[in-house]
Image (cartoon, rainbow, N blue to C red):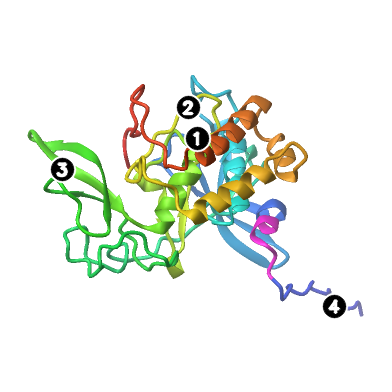
Amino acid sequence: MSAPERIPPRSLTPPEPSELLALGELTVRGRVREASNAVLYCTVEYDGHSAPCVYKPVAGERPLWDFPDGTLAQREVAAYEISEATGWGLVPPTVLRDGPYGRGMCQLWVEVAEGDGPDGSDGPDGSDGSDGSGDSDDPAADGTELLALIEGDEPGPGWKAVGFAEVGEGRTALLVHADDVRLRRLAVLDAVINNGDRKGGHLLPAAGGRLYAIDHGVTFNAEDKLRTLLWGWAGEPLPDEVLDVLRGLADQLADDGSLGARLAKLITGAEIEALRARVAALLRTGVHPAPSGQWPAIPWPPV
């Protein structure tokens, strides 16, 4: 009588998300139809553990006139590297790997939390219960309403104005975003990575007050491409905490740093030099950047 087949035990310690994404077996479950490029919803399984994820194969990328073909997945990974280097953890774990449809980006799926306002509030109408003092010191605020269109010329307490938008029938409304430390950090991250497409739909408030941001393929161009809905702090001084993070990032981007070596596998040398220059400019000016006026400052569509 033969001995029964031994089933390998499930590891009691879950792998790190990046390890799970890089080494696990990808199984395609569906496709995100709204995306302009191929975005596949998958599960990844490794060492007895599994998680939902997004897989964007390079073969499914739509060519863009101002970016080299087949580089969007690498830029997504580079954005994750910079996010991790800041310590803010704003981009979900993201790796470059082979999959069912070839080389591509694989990113941990983030479930969006339910909520009412940036601090558990009702919205930007002045009834949010805040004291109007600006940024929350708590990066784990519980609310999920981050953007809104309101009547009138001024945002309510706890909100920052972006600009006026046409809402149909000759009417306009004021576009506002939450005056939220998480969004402020993201605005800085976008300035650093030169994000040309920060839309509202890319903001994912998650459980525990975490905020994640996705879709970073249109980044790291050597030319200024910043387009975002997060202009509310334009021209304002950068907080000391942000300046400290930028100084640390500049050190990590030095020629002999491991971060620069990792980025060199993902973006070009000219793009790395432009990245260093953007960080240096933020430290030199000490303020949030403002729209240049040379091109549309807000992406279209904005959601």
Mark 2 vs mark 1, CA separation in Å:
7 Å
Q: Residue at x 67, y 35 (%)?
A: 266
- Would you say the residues marked 2 and 1 are in contact, meaning their CB atoms lie under 8 Å apart? yes
Expressed as whole percent of the image width and height from the top left, the position of residue 30 reads: 49, 49
Residue where numbered disc 1 is placed: 194
Residue 95: mark in rendering:
none
Nearer the N terminus, badge 3 or badge 1? 3
Nearer the N terminus, badge 2 or badge 4? 4
Nearer the N terminus, badge 3 or badge 4? 4
Residue 272 sits above or below residue 158 on the image: above
Q: Amino acid at mark 3?
A: Ala
Instruction: Indicate which label's residue lies in the foreground, 2 or 3.
Output: 2
Residue where numbered disc 3 is placed: 173
Q: Secondary structure under badge 4?
A: loop
Instruction: Give the magenta range.
Output: 14-20
| Residue 143 painted magenta | no
Tell which of 86 and 267 is nearer to you. 86
Instruction: Indicate which label's residue lies in the foreground, 2 or 4.
Output: 2
Q: Secondary structure under badge 3?
A: strand
Nearer the N terminus, badge 1 or badge 4? 4
Expressed as whole percent of the image width and height from the top left, the position of residue 259 reads: 70, 44
Tell which of 93 and 45 is nearer to you. 93
User: The C terminus is located in which quarter?
Assistant: top left
Mark 1 vs mark 4, CA separation in Å:
58 Å
Residue where numbered disc 4 is placed: 4
Q: Amino acid at mark 1?
A: Asn
Tell me, yes or no, if residue 258 can be seen here: yes
Mark 2 vs mark 4, CA separation in Å:
64 Å
Tell which of 262 and 292 is nearer to you. 292
Residue where numbered disc 2 is placed: 224
Nearer the N terminus, badge 2 or badge 1? 1
Mark 3 vs mark 1, CA separation in Å:
27 Å
